[in-house]
Image (cartoon, grey):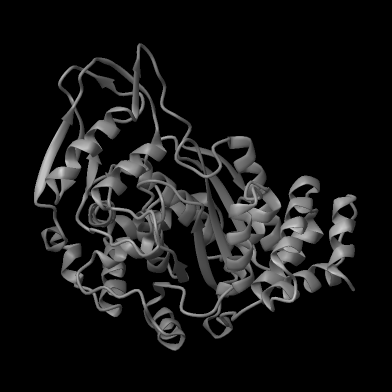
Amino acid sequence: MRMYDIIAKKRDGKKLDNKDIAFFINGYIKEQIPDYQASAFLMAAFLNGLDDDETVHLTKVMASSGDMADLRELGTVADKHSTGGVADTTTLIVVPLVCACGLKVAKMSGRGLGHTGGTLDKLESIPGMSVSLEMNAFMSQVKRIGGAVIGQTMNMCPADKMLYALRDVTATVESIPLIASSIMSKKLASGSNIIMLDVKTGSGAFMTDPDNAQKLANTMVRIGNMAGRKTAAIISDMSQPLGLAVGNSLEVIEAIDVLSGRIQGDLLTVSLSLASRMLCLANIAKNDEDANAMLLEALHSKRALHKFGEIITAQGGNTNVIHDTSLMPHARIISTLHAKSEGILTATDCKRIGEAAGMLGAGRLKKDDIIDPAVGFIIKKRIGDTVKYGDELFEVHANDENKIEEAMKYLEKCITLTNSAKSPTLIYGLVSSCG
């Protein structure tokens, strides 16, 4: 078998068999196939596509290219993944909610990069909280209290790391089969038998077009189900930040406020939608109505809040933050950006809002950038709200005076005021519903 023949086969629009795909992946991670041939293959796949069989097998081979978590002794275990956005703190709400309802969650999360926030960075803003657990400790915690959220601890999916770096410099990122296999290979390697996906669309999402987000969700659900994992997805809006807080400590505080019942809104709505599907996939709930009743009971009784406290304690954090958020990191300087014109908030540049938080130190442009957990801002107006001259638009939290003015100028350009507007659709669709 030659890589040349595999490239030519896909170039000519022919279907690859399992041996072709395995030869490519295994040869590439062993450095037996050079970058120039891998690049040619990726471009051929980008231009001619991959069908379901090809995509599923590519995903499986990538998943098995490194270590794979074996969670079978835990029974039914769920995982949840978001394609990324701004103020998307659903993991910190969904995990304790479904755990409080009896579903185990073994969650391996990532860090923020660019304009998107990272769950690990948010958790590390909790004093003492560790997201680094060895596999045995991780599984023990899930077995004992029902849930854990950690960083990737094993050599998972090296093929994906290598191929993504190559796709990034060869203009082959925007391929739905390649995106789907990249995401789902990591989900399969993580070992859970239930996978819940939140595919974002809008100005702050990777998939800005709802139709493409729907195609990506459909593809990933098919991959998961064909690989023997119960998989479902929602397509949700990221045309504006999901929550009202942007920044690591501020987002944890907002999640605690949601779990405490002090605030509601879009963040809670999307969290409940994700959690409901997870309970249905696990057969803990018969249908959405049954699931929602269980989740609201866990929320109103504070069982979900206390479950979050258990997870924090188990991972070395100060669980008192769930009762006293003043224990969380806070910025030294708080300034307010006021409206300089009037109208109805019609649109936001959600990506630029995330970038503005990065200017304050809440995010990173490179993986080794240092995060300031305390900085960020609170959003005071949502799309559809009426804005009068002098109204508060953003409450900016900073530790460096030199960064405030730049961030505020950036934020001013993130909003559009006109004479009329309507609130965006929050959840566009569902793939593989229950009940």
Q: Nearer the viewer, residue 88 or 225?
A: 88
Q: Nearer the viewer, residue 249 or 270?
A: 249
Q: Quadrant of residue 109?
A: bottom left
**How many labels sit on residues?**
0
Most extreme residue toward the top is 419
Q: Position of residue 375 (x, y in %)?
A: 21, 51
Which residue sits at x=14%, y=49%? 400
Q: Nearer the viewer, residue 401 or 235?
A: 401
Q: Position of residue 363 (x, y in %)?
A: 32, 53
Which residue sits at x=30%, y=79%? 314
Q: Quadrant of the N terminus?
A: bottom right
Which residue sits at x=52%, y=60%? 278
Above-or-below relation of 358 to 137? above
Q: Position of residue 318 (x, y in %)?
A: 19, 72
State left or right for residue 295 relative to residue 35: left
State left or right for residue 298 relative to residue 17: left
Q: Quadrant of residue 338?
A: top left
User: Does any portion of residue 207 appear in the rendered image?
Assistant: yes
Q: Quadrant of residue 184?
A: bottom right
State left or right for residue 408 relative to residue 173: left
State left or right for residue 167 relative to residue 137: right
Most extreme residue toward the left is 332
Q: Position of residue 65 (x, y in %)?
A: 66, 76
Which residue sits at x=24%, y=20%? 387
Above-or-below relation of 419 to 332? above
Q: Nearer the viewer, residue 79 or 330?
A: 330
